[in-house]
């Protein structure tokens, strides 16, 4: 197993590319205690913060993904046999903050298991459309004890562009059109995808969490955020506040 730890990844490997690419098949990775941050990278010069190619097995623990038009893509569409046959993602004790979308996105038969993760203000780094976590084209996401908070207020232009691009995506997928704003798509499935969640939290009832078997309350959600903060590198200097402070502000009554 290859271990990638204690790194700050804040520039693309190539201009307009990804921050980190993990390659398969038949390779295993542990990514822990890392910060992925595209705050200083122009949107026209970036792609995913993290992506995988040809179906590796990846475990992510205690990582923070900050901004970026796309956070994490599981399955790249070019190698569906390896991706769906061998690719697996496990994400624990991690936070996705202020990204545009893909927190994560699962496709091409890839399975993503998420536990004790926080997705906050997806769509804030907006380029064409917004969503939190999304499974389609045979991808599956299972989420347990995850927190979804949204306080971002998109412009009218962003709302219109978001809707149009989701219509276009549904056309490309040959189905799965849903009349839900991307800024309310917390954990959703598209054409031929599946999501299942339990013991999750949302700070707005308008946030769509497909197939959520049980919701938790603010106190339980705050404990999850505290646990994530303890596991992750300190990012308060980058964000101007700790993870718990950001959560408290997002859920203030």
Image (cartoon, helix red, strand yellow):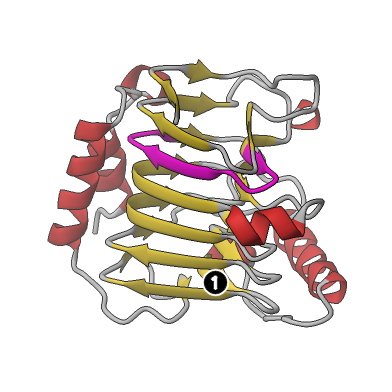
Q: Which residues are magenta?
A: 51-64
Residue furthest toward the front? 26
Q: Is residue 149 magenta?
A: no
Q: Give the camera-side residue of 246 and 58.
A: 58
Residue at the image position 48 percent from the left and 34 percent from the top:
29
Residue 106 can be seen, yes or no = no
Q: Secondary structure at mark 1?
A: strand
Quadrant for the C terminus in the image: bottom left
Residue 60 in magenta? yes
Image quadrant assignment for residue 154: bottom right
Residue 251, position as x, y percentages in the image: 28, 55
Estimate the x, y position of residue 234 in percent, counting from the top left.
Answer: 30, 22
Tell me what residue is drawn at x 15 percent, y 60 percent: 220
State left or right for residue 230 relative to residue 190: left
Q: Residue at x 29, y 36 (%)?
A: 243
| Secondary structure mostly seen in the magenta stretch | strand
Instruction: Please rate how many residues cluster around mark 1, counting C-alpha atoms within 10 Å: few if below 14, some from 14 to 19, many from 20.
Output: many
User: Which image quadrant: the N terminus?
Assistant: top left
Viewer-closest of 180 and 70: 70
Q: Which quadrant holds residue 229?
A: top left
Residue labelled with disc 1? 188
Foreground residue among 88 and 243:
88
Q: State the image quarter where residue 190 is shown.
A: bottom right
Residue 13's place in the image compared with 219, above or below, is above
């Amino acid at each position: 197993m290859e271990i990638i730890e204690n790194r700050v990844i804040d520039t693309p490997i190539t201009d307009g590319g990804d921050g980190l690419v993990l390659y398969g098949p038949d390779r295993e990775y542990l990514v822990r205690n890392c910060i992925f941050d595209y705050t200083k990278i122009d949107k026209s010069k970036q792609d995913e913060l993290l992506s995988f190619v040809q179906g590796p097995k990846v475990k992510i623990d205690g990582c923070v993904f900050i901004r970026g038009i796309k956070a994490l893509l599981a399955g790249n569409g070019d190698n569906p046999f390896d991706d769906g046959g061998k690719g697996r993602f496990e994400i624990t004790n991690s936070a996705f903050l202020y990204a545009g979308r893909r927190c994560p996105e699962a496709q091409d038969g890839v399975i993503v298991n998420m536990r004790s993760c926080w997705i906050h203000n997806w769509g804030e780094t907006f380029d064409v459309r917004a969503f939190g976590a999304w499974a389609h084209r045979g991808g599956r996401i299972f989420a347990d004890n995850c927190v979804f908070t949204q306080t971002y207020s998109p412009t009218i232009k962003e709302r219109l562009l978001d809707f149009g691009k989701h219509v276009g995506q549904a056309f490309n997928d040959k189905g799965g059109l849903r009349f839900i704003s991307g800024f309310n798509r917390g954990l959703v499935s598209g054409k031929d995808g599946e999501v299942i969640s339990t013991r999750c939290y949302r700070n707005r009832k308008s946030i769509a969490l497909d197939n959520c078997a049980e919701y938790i309350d603010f106190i339980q959600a705050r404990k999850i955020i505290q646990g994530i903060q303890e596991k992750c590198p300190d990012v308060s200097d980058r964000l101007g506040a700790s993870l718990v402070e950001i959560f408290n502000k997002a859920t203030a009554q």
